[in-house]
Image (cartoon, rainbow, N blue to C red):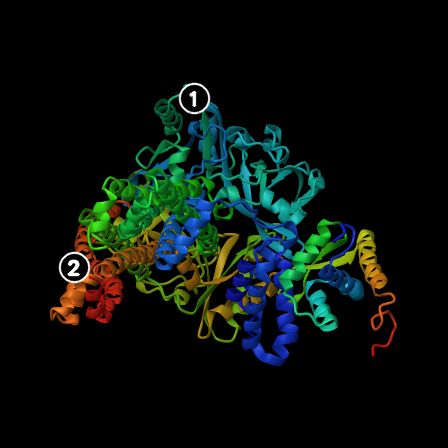
Amino acid sequence: MTSINSAGDFEQLVLLSVLRLGEHAYGMTVRKEIEEQAGRSVSLGAVYRTLQRLEDKGWVRSRLAHGGDERNRRAKRFFSLETAGEEALRAALDAVDRMRDGVTGFAYGEVPR
Amino acid sequence: MRRKPFPGKMTERLLMFLLRTPRQDEIVGDLIEEARTRIMPSGGRMRAHFWLLKEALRSVPSLFGEDPLRGGMGEGIGGDFRFALRTLRNRPLFAFLTVLTLGVGIGAPTAMFSVVDGILLKSLPYQDPGRLVSLWKVHRDWRGQPEIGERWDRGLINLREFRSWREGNTHFENVAAYQGTWRAFTGRDGATLLSVGEATASLIPTLGVTMHLGRWFSASEEATAGEDDSSVAVLSHGFWERVYGADEGVLGTGIVLHGQAYTIVGVLPADFRLRLLEKSDPGSREVWVPVGVNYLPGSGAENSGDWETVGRLAAGAGIESAEAEALSLLRGDRDPETYDFRLSPRMEGEARGLTSPLVLLLGATAVLLLIGCGNASMLLLGEMEGREHELATRAALGAGRGRILRQLVTEGAVLGLLGAGVGALLAVVGTRGLVDLAPALPRMDRVLIDFRALTVCTLLGLGTGIGFAVIPALLSSRRSPAGSLGRSARAGGGRRRSVSRGVVVGQATLTVVLLVMGGLLVRNLERVTSTDPGFNPEGVATVKVTVPLFAYGSAEEVLRFLEEATREIEAIPGVESVGAVFPVPFSGDAESRTMSIDPDSPGGGRRVEVMRSVVTPGYWETMGLPLMEGRELTVQDGRGSPEVAVVSESFARMHWPGESAVGQTIGNVGVPSSIRVVGVVGDVLRESFRIQPEPTFYVPLAQVLRLRFNFVARTRDDPEDLVSAMTVAVGSAGPSAPLTEGETLSSLMARSTRGQRFSSLLMRIFGVMAAILAATGVFGVTARQIAQSQREMGIRLALGAEAPGLVGRVVSAGLAPAGMGTALGLIMALGSARLLGGFLFEFDSFEPMVYLSAGGTLLGVCSLAIVVPALRITRVDPATVLREE
């Protein structure tokens, strides 16, 4: 069951990378972060699509900035988390933590066999 | 060497096209940045390019696909529908061809119509535009001359004439005048030239336009503008968005133009335009200011300037009596030998020029729709013929007539809907593509897919699908099942086969007409653009400059700037010669003057309207313009020395036939003046390839000071590089002189034909589409016939006929209707081309090569469409066929 107030799997990855990147979070870096940290190859389109959805839900906000020559002066859109986004992410991660709790071999901090 | 930009214009445009969403700019920016910073350093340009395209394509599905979280198509598709889909899946070739043909037939015309409608057919955004008229000055010398005559029929007037008209007329609710000009504006990116409109306060009330924000000028502001700091300005919607970020707080703030402060009082609506179709629409001006004190009644400026007019006829007032009145009001002012005035409805002027090519394209659109539907009907007819046996079997097994009909209708509807879907997709892609492909045609920015057209085309497609699925069934169900079954699945339906042949003939005819038209337009364009312009554009670059009076107080200062800038440009490595001129050929600028010929003769000489060019001595050398007689202008022809001019060959021929022009005099009208002609130069095309060289006189810039002109320079190297070097050079000579973008002369010239290039490109697309459709149809018919005549072929082969001979027979039988259509098409094309020739300038309707290649192309494509399925005959095994008997 997907709760309205909890982030989905890919949404979690996107939200986490926006958090990790802080003020450097824009389309290209978010995608790179997901690729490098989570080892998941995703298209830039999917990243933007998800960010758009998160923005529609009021979980992230975006801000437009001027781009430099390295991007042929095209605009740059930075993303950051809204409080609702942080809550949704926390709810999702807590759910995972609770589910992991006590499962042999998967509990948080337990060394896998 | 300058590094080539990455990823290049074409690729960047493609990326933007693929990722067209509200956030495309950021997405493309991200892709470029990543390609440049991560891929290119290790993999090089080539790999970076591929990476870009791959990533863009990979992004398309998630950007445009259904959002999986928001659900997809619902359930509940009827049984008939599923059954229809299943039967179609069993006949993939037929289904594919029919859907494709309907899709192209629906999509292409819809896209075309959307574009044509967006440019041409949408009415002007004015209140009651039928009552709007314009007052034109007619130059008698030019009346009746092709092309030039039409243009001179629409001569602009000066403010003095406008004021006489405004004060005296009784037929109008309101009249207004406006003209375009340029002003220096210092914004975030430094000094730029702004296109500015000057208008009377009556302009917006006359047109009946509602302001987007604030207000327009008042009559008192018109009288005092420029006098003190109380001047007001109105912004265009585009300028307001671009420069002020659509900030509503802009009202009441200031803007400085040419050193003069204005207060912004209003913003025009986004769709404000004064003319619909002109290249340089004065309505696209970025800022509007009132006429003001620069043109006070009785001042010299009142007599100059090119003002366009618009008046709103009072209810019940007739245009004829309004024109008679205008003539009597203005005749006292003017020499009736030279000038006349006339009124023309606003709408008439709008559509001129672009109409005929667009109407032609609209016609082509209808033809393509016809071919598409014809094709689909043919495929369906053939298919039904083949299914007679199946239908008879079903009827024999007890299926009612209604039941069978319902199934056929569903099948037709499914095909029609699929076709319409493909068509809608093609229409969307096509409309976008055309808009991207198109040159900056007026209003191109507002072209959207036209849903009326899509609806009509879709209904037609559906109608074709259902109609031609049902008609043959209606015919055949009259027969008894026994009859059909008894004949097994053998040949039959001769009547329908002749219908198919008729459709092939019709298609071939229309296709050939389209191919010929496309070919003729292309040929015509080639011939027109290969006209010798009279100068050599190779290696020549130009930059436009406007000297702001507020920064250069006196004529001497302006001339000093001119000399210094010329020296700076000469110092650029590779530059061979430098000059300055106004107007540059093919730039869209033009200037005419009323001059008197032999002003010292009794009566003050004959008055004529001629073109004027203001030049510096280096101009002719730079342009490679030959001197025919006398001498060129030199630096000695400066301020204070005797006034001199050089005339063009046609000028000399027209005004001093049989005499030498050198030593003759011309004069300005209204002031005592005598300008001696010192030389004759060759004629040049001034405005476009389509307008013949006009009589021109050249005067030195030092004697006739102008504040707006172009530098031209010739280089041994690449003129593209010269453009930027010239910009730098002029900028260093006069930092406060704003430049507009420079360009090479060759690209200026190419731009003048972009409208024609676009329409001939579209016609070629039409021709190719039509040929593909026609070939598809022929292929479908032939494939079906051959499949049906397997038995006959088998028997013939068994009786000793040779396979190659049989193939030959089939091919020639299939080609006969295509050949007939081609012949008919060539005749029809000849007729339509002559009709077209009446609309287009110097259009040669008879180009044998065009006709030959059009006919040849169609026959070639059709042969291929016949030969491929015909070769199947060689694989027929007589034994198998005979065993079936």
Q: Which is more toward the observer, B867 or B594? A: B867
Chain name for mark 1: B
- Residue type at tag 2: Ala
Q: SS of the residue at dot 2?
A: helix
Tag 1 or tag 2, which sits nearer the N-term? Answer: 1
- Amino acid type at mark 1: His
Chain to which the residue tagged by mark 2 belongs = B
Instruction: Assign a secondary structure to mark 1.
Output: loop
Can residue B101 be seen from the camera position used here?
Answer: yes
Q: Is residue B46 left or right of residue B526?
A: right
B53 vs B437, left or right, is: right
Mark 2 neighbour class, 10 Å CA radius: few under 14, some 14 to 19, many 20 or more: few
Task: Confirm whether circles 2 and 1 share one chain.
Answer: yes
Q: Which residue is mark 1?
A: B171
User: Residue B306's spot in the image, x, y percent?
Assistant: 46, 41
- Mark 2 or mark 1, whichever is nearer to me: 2
Give whichever of B193, B251 is nearer the camera: B251
Q: Position of residue A49 (x, y in %)?
A: 65, 57
Residue at the far bottom: name it: B42
Q: Residue furthest left?
A: B800
User: In the figure, residue B816 lies in which quadrant?
Assistant: bottom left
> Which residue in the protein does label 2 denote?
B813
Residue B632 vs B497, above or below: the answer is below
- Name the spot of residue B268 as percent of width and height, x first: 59, 38
Task: Name the spot of residue B634 as percent of width and height, x first.
Answer: 42, 63
Quadrant assignment for the N terminus of chain B: bottom right
